[in-house]
Image (cartoon, helix red, strand yellow):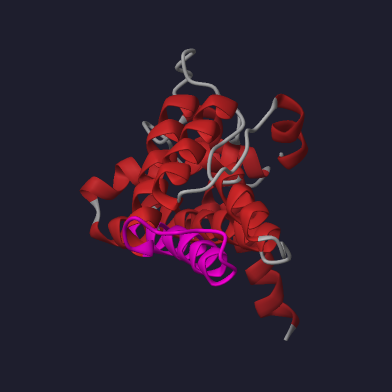
């Protein structure tokens, strides 16, 4: 039983190394030996576990999708106040800076999705999971009488996730005109318009506390 566990740990180690390598240098020109160097392993060992780079990238993408979603889910599930839950959902959907490695990797792999249907499925999966976070928060708020919808919960949620993705891309690409706080507040303004309520304003201290 020890051998399968060791192999699983080794795979996790290589996925983590590939994630770090992609965050640092991007996908273009990434090689097995770059991942091996990051992991402190031989290129032959990495190739033994992952005969092609695409095999490794799929596991990196799967792990990144799970981590990003779980991070948000764990942060909001204990919020009893519907407004707090919705604001927390917004906070964690937009990276604090271009140096967020998980978001950087996701954006790299999402672009890769245009050329690979399996990556496209993972991108769609993450989108659906994020929409579900919003729809849950919206429905909880409506049941408490805090929100009044001007469109369906699914339409509001999809638009909010689309706004997050657009702002997040600019942040990761180091567009100096877009800040994390400004982006989050823009999403809040959209939600306020759709829900007929005041959600508040993010400030620098609040943003830092979430990271």
Magenta stretch: helix, strand or loop mostly: helix
Q: State the image coordinates of residue 122 (x, y, percent, origin top left).
A: 37, 60
The answer to whether any part of residue 48 appears in the image is no
Q: Quadrant of residue 6?
A: bottom right
The answer to whether any part of residue 153 appears in the image is yes
- The quadrant of the picture occupied by the N terminus is bottom right
Picture residue at 50% right of the left edge, 57% below the top:
65
Picture residue at 75% right of the left edge, 80% below the top:
2
User: Which range of residues does the magenta coloring cover?
Assistant: 124-153
- Lateral position of residue 126 relative to residue 33, left or right: left
Q: State the image coordinates of residue 36 (x, y, percent, origin top left).
A: 58, 43
Q: Is residue 194 magenta?
A: no
- Lateral position of residue 48 relative to residue 51, left or right: right
Picture residue at 70% right of the left edge, 76% below the top:
5
How many discs mark residues in the rendered view?
0
Q: Quadrant of residue 127?
A: bottom left
- The quadrant of the picture occupied by the C terminus is top right
Q: State the image coordinates of residue 9 (x, y, percent, origin top left).
A: 68, 65
Q: State the image coordinates of residue 29 (x, y, percent, origin top left).
A: 37, 31
Viewer-closest of 131 and 124: 131
Tell which residue pokes out farthest to the top in this image: 176
In this view, 124 is above or below 19: below
Viewer-closest of 69 and 84: 84
Q: Quadrant of residue 152?
A: bottom left
In this view, 46 is above or below 135: above
Viewer-closest of 72 and 14: 72
Picture residue at 49% right of the left edge, 26% below the top:
171
């Amino acid at each position: 039983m020890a051998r399968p566990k060791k192999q699983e740990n080794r795979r996790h180690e290589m996925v983590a190394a590939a994630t770090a390598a992609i965050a640092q240098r991007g996908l273009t020109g990434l090689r097995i030996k770059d991942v091996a160097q990051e992991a402190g392993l031989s290129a032959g060992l990495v190739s033994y576990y992952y005969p092609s780079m695409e095999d490794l990238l799929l596991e990196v993408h799967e792990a990144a999708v799970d981590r990003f979603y779980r991070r948000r889910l764990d942060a909001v599930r204990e919020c009893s106040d519907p407004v707090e839950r919705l604001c927390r959902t917004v906070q964690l959907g937009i990276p604090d800076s271009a140096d967020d490695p998980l978001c950087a990797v996701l954006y790299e792999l999402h672009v890769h999705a245009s050329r690979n249907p399996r990556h496209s499925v993972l991108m769609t999966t993450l989108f659906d999971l994020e929409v579900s976070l919003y729809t849950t928060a919206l429905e909880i708020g409506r049941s408490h009488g805090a929100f009044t919808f001007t469109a369906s919960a699914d339409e509001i949620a999809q638009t909010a996730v689309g706004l997050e993705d657009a702002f997040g891309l600019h942040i990761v690409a180091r567009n100096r005109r877009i800040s994390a706080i400004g982006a989050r507040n823009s999403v809040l303004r959209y939600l306020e318009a759709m829900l007929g309520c005041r959600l508040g304003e993010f400030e620098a201290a609040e943003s830092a506390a979430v990271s």
